[in-house]
Amino acid sequence: MKRSYQYAGLQNPKQEGLSVDQCAARIHRFAYAAERLMFLQASHIISTPERDVKVLLARLQYENSQHASQFKARLPELRISKKKAYQAPDVSLQIVFDEAMYAANTVELLAGLTKVFKPALLEAYRRYVEDTNGLADYPTVRILKTVIAEVADGLRQLEAAYDDLIDTPEKEAEAETWSRTLHNLLAAAGGIDGTGEVNLDALEPVRATNPYLIPKQLTRDDTFPRVWDIIHVDNERVEERLMQMIATRLGETTIAEALGFVLYEMKDQPWEFYTDISRHLWDEMRHSVFGEAAAEDIFDNRSTMPIRDWESAYLFRMDPLELYAMLFGVEAGLMKYPPGKREEFEFCRDAARHPLMTTLQDFDWADEVLHVHIARRRLKEWFNGSPEELQALGQKGLDFRARARAMHPQSPLPDASGKIKSTQ
Ligand SMILES: [Fe+2]
Ligand SMILES: [Fe+2]
């Protein structure tokens, strides 16, 4: 009798499978593709106006950074030097992803991700699992199982967004043209895993004749009413203070967008730099979604809550180092108690008694502690000057921030009286 748990339940234990070198060659390309998708998605968050797509991109760029890390870490176990593992495998895939950066709008961006790259990833990952000996190459198959599940879930979300947004024959034609360009380039590069034939003659970039530059312009759709800043009140005015906190969380999307510049514009950093910033970016976008979820919970309509734009007036005009030093200054300041992140959490728990916001602020606090650690670590490696010079740089940013904030008056907050479902 054949027992399913013989060979610990592993697949293909008796098939010849792939050699260590063949496995390493494919995984090297998987690592590079995931890395480039992180950059592609992170750098387009700012230029994507549609709120729900913006948020989805922030999640997907982070998940791709994690996949790239897992693949890169597997390579030295397959007799590949650590140095090589963290470099690009060859120029063919590079040309494809350089071109993908030039998606001109959400239609093209979604077309590339939904119709070309994510299905191609899944196909290559599944082929790998079929081709390899699941006993000999167990550690890779284990990684791929979770990566496949995550990419498949991400693709389902992208497909839903694609169906929503590409809703006219013109947009369909536009999506079709761009996905054909990328599909042909990817095929000419031998596919994601390099198992296809390489056709160097067809590997010509169409738009990517120069490195892509992120357009530093704030784009928003009309999901939330836009204001410059919101009124600030004392903790004694409990309902208004809670509204202010929710609106502040919602506005953190601007920080996430600015971290997209830091991620993309800081070239030639160690890989851990990018995974840290990628995480930081996704956290700030999650904090913005904290505000969105709380607004929807209270008003049954997220659009009641205004989104503040003032932060773009300084964040989008700083160089990445100055921006990051300034963020570090702000985030480190939030660790002081009182007021700080701990007080915000206690306010939600004890004064507003709002269960959802209590949970969200509890995690917001935990995330911010993590960010201060990330920033301290990164700035130390990244900044060559003295601690005093770094502080001066951060202070310059903080002054710029204060001037930007004061440029226009603050707007009132939505009236939540009688709407807060607290446990009081
Ligand atoms: Fe945050
Ligand atoms: Fe933060």
Image (cartoon, grey):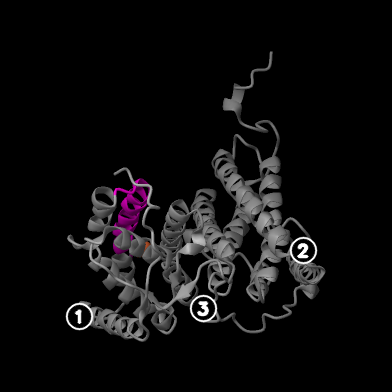
Evaluate whether residue 335 shows in this view.
no
Toward the viewer: 169 or 385?
169
Q: Amino acid at mark 1?
A: Glu
Quarter of the image for the N terminus: give it. Answer: top right
Say which residue label 2 marks. 187
Relative height, residue 12 to residue 345 (above, below): above
Q: Quadrant of residue 378?
A: bottom left
Q: Amino acid at mark 2?
A: Ala
Quarter of the image for the C terminus: give it. Answer: top left
Label 2 neighbour load within 10 Å: few <14, some 14-19, many 20+: many
Q: Main secondary structure of the magenta part?
A: helix
Q: CA distance from mark 1 to mark 2?
A: 52 Å
Which residue corresponds to the image point at 43% horizontal and 79% vertical from the top-left? Answer: 312
Select label 1 or label 2 by which is in front: 1
In percent of width and height, residue 402 lies at 30, 82
Is residue 84 covered in magenta? no
Q: Which residues are magenta?
A: 353-374
Instruction: State left or right for residue 406 relative to residue 183.
Output: left
Instruction: State left or right for residue 6 relative to residue 162.
Output: left
Say which residue label 3 marks. 218
Toward the viewer: 97 or 334?
334
What label does residue 161 carry, if any? none
